[in-house]
Amino acid sequence: MKRITQHPLFWPVITLALLLVVSALFQPSFLALTWRDGHLYGSVIDILNRAAPLMVVSLGMTLVIAVRGLDISVGAVVAISAAVAALLVGGSFSATGEVQAVHPLWVALASALAVAAACGWWNGLLVVKAGMQPIVATLILMVAGRGIAQLLTGGQIITVYYPPFFTLGNGFFLGLPVALWVAGALWIALHLVLSRTALGLFVRSIGGNPEAARVAGVRSSAITLCVYTFCGLAAGVAGLIVSSNVKSADANNAGQLLELDAILAVTLGGTALTGGRFTLAGTVIGALIIQTLTSMIYSLGVPPEVNLVVKAVLVFTVMMLQSAEFRQLVARLARPDKSLAGNRR
Amino acid sequence: MKRLLPLTVTIALFVAMAAFGAVRYEGFLSLQVLLNLIIDNAFLCVVAVGMTFVILSGGIDLSVGALIALTTIISATLLDLGWNPYATMATVLVLGAAFGALQGFLIQRFNLAPFLVTLAGMFLARGCCYLISTESIPINDATYAAIAQARIPVGGGASLTIGGLIALAVVAIAMRIAHSTEFGRTVYAIGGGESSARLMGLSVDSTKVGVYLLSGLCAALGGIVMTFYMLSGYSLHAVGLELDAIAAVVIGGTLLAGGVGYVAGTLFGVLILGIIQTLIAFDGSLSSWWTRIVVGALLLLFCLLQRLFEGRTPRAS
């Protein structure tokens, strides 16, 4: 029993299960899955679909946090990637009434991802080469990035008319949302790379003690740079999913506050903010917790305004549970006789 | 001397931008345009001063923007209920200070990351705003309207608002606190090295709580200044203001790692943010998003400068 409760994923899984049970109790149709129009349909699928962009961003954030970093620019990168993709795909009606893309779809997607990766690489450069604190280094792009996205779109919402672009955010493959496949594929690929190669060990060692890792021969700078680049890339993928889902790019609002949700998802999943210890599965569960909570609040008919307060309470609770000082305090309060005995001795 | 260099760069940059505006645009270099920089950014200035102390102590406070919104909405609600305007101001100041102190207590007592605690604080404050009202509440109180319209002549036909005056007073008081009180010296010492400050016998614990209390108080005061400016309470006031405040502090030459910086620098940081917007407004052909891009570029410039200075300062170790 103790082995189960001490498993790092125990609390995240319990939290998610609890949220699902509460949702199912209040809304009997919550867990129902039906097959309609060639794909699965139901609240759970909806949650999975909506959580996909957050999952993708949070996976990138997990690695950044694992190497003692932080990336608060992901929301801005989502906006940039969405803007680039929407601008390049565009979509105009030809004489025959057919919608044509301005540039081939793959060019647009690849460009958006390349720009997003470049944003992450830039963050990494500032952290590794210029030696800035991660929060400061990424603050620069967080402030300027949304401005750049607005510059690209001219402050307008860019609407995309080219149908194939919508597949990523709205399509289904083998009955499940394409966005979910993308997030799942990224998770599995990342898991394989980190567990089958030494890379996972290197990331853990950099997060555990950067200096010791460097002295031990781990190429900290190169790996940290890669991790930030990957985080940018992940934000780019999320930007594509988001813009494809709403069939447009809104530079002002795309990815707004996403960096905070991503950090929250990573923390909820059990990754230590101090670096070194990370869990990809935990992050995925963390992202699902956030989305389930949001959906639950909507479906329970509670005013959506409460969402932020609930999130705040959630963050406070998780922080307290992770704090060694708080656990000591609770332990002392729970067993006053023992601590007294300890004092007497 | 070396420590004054970032501040000198900040002031020189401000003067250069003002000179650029004066040469390029007619009517730019008037006392009223300069005073408007303070008037239009009074709330930012007050908040940034509080943020300066937090950053000097090596922490960060992300909750200030949301706290401002909460202050405006509580003020508007209380005034709507027929409260005395001065009692309203006192209440929100106490609430702001208590909110900040609570965050400081959590950070200090349970050794939590300031980033996370104030992030949760931001969610909480913004959420409370929505709970109270999702609509903008107008303020019709006679006293508030009178304060909002009052202009204090400063000679030469130029004038200052009460909000602007409060901002300048806050800067003056904060400079005094930072540089000639025990609290101020302890803040610098904590930013320089918390364990050394503790070993020196300084009251690290209470000062850390005090820093966040001060930031909460400044945010509430900033909220009051904003109600004078906007004459409304709204849950979407001051979205993202914490970023502007942090940017102003950094551009003002304060080291984000803590321990180095000046309150006066923050004033100039706010003025630089203001003058960028004024320049863009005077130009007329540039869009508002250039503000963000220029602020980002300035942030980069100052962070790189700071790294350069840090690199050259010989380390004691």
Image (spheres, helix red, strand yellow):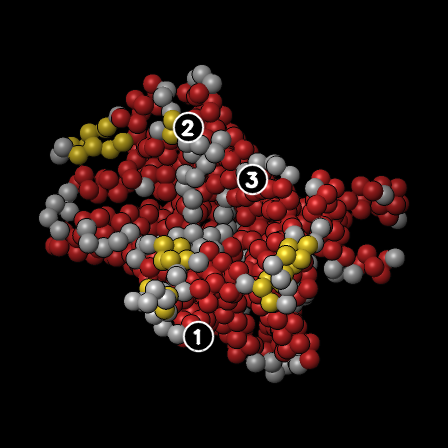
Name the amino acid type tagged 2: Ile
Residue with the mark numbered 2: B137
Report the residue at 57% width, 36% height from top. A303
Instruction: Please say if A196 is above or below A299.
Output: below
- Identify which residue, B101 or A92, lies in the foreground: A92
Q: Name the residue beneath numbered marker 3.
A: A304
Residue at mark 3: chain: A
Chain of the residue where label 2 is placed in the rendered structure: B
Query: What subunit carries mark 1?
Result: A
- Residue B91 x/y as whole percent: 49, 25
- Evaluate whether label 3 is on the same chain as label 1: yes
* Measured Cα–Cα span from mark 3 to mark 1: 38 Å
At horizontal 40% and vertical 36% (from top left) the residue drawn is B222
Q: In this picture, is A276 found above or below A221?
A: above
Disc 3 from disc 2: Cα separation? 20 Å
Name the residue nearer the viewer: B33 or B133. Answer: B133
Quarter the N terminus of chain B occupies = bottom left
Residue A250: percent from left, percent from top: 40, 55
Q: Is residue B33 visible?
A: yes
User: How many marks do you count on the picture?
Assistant: 3
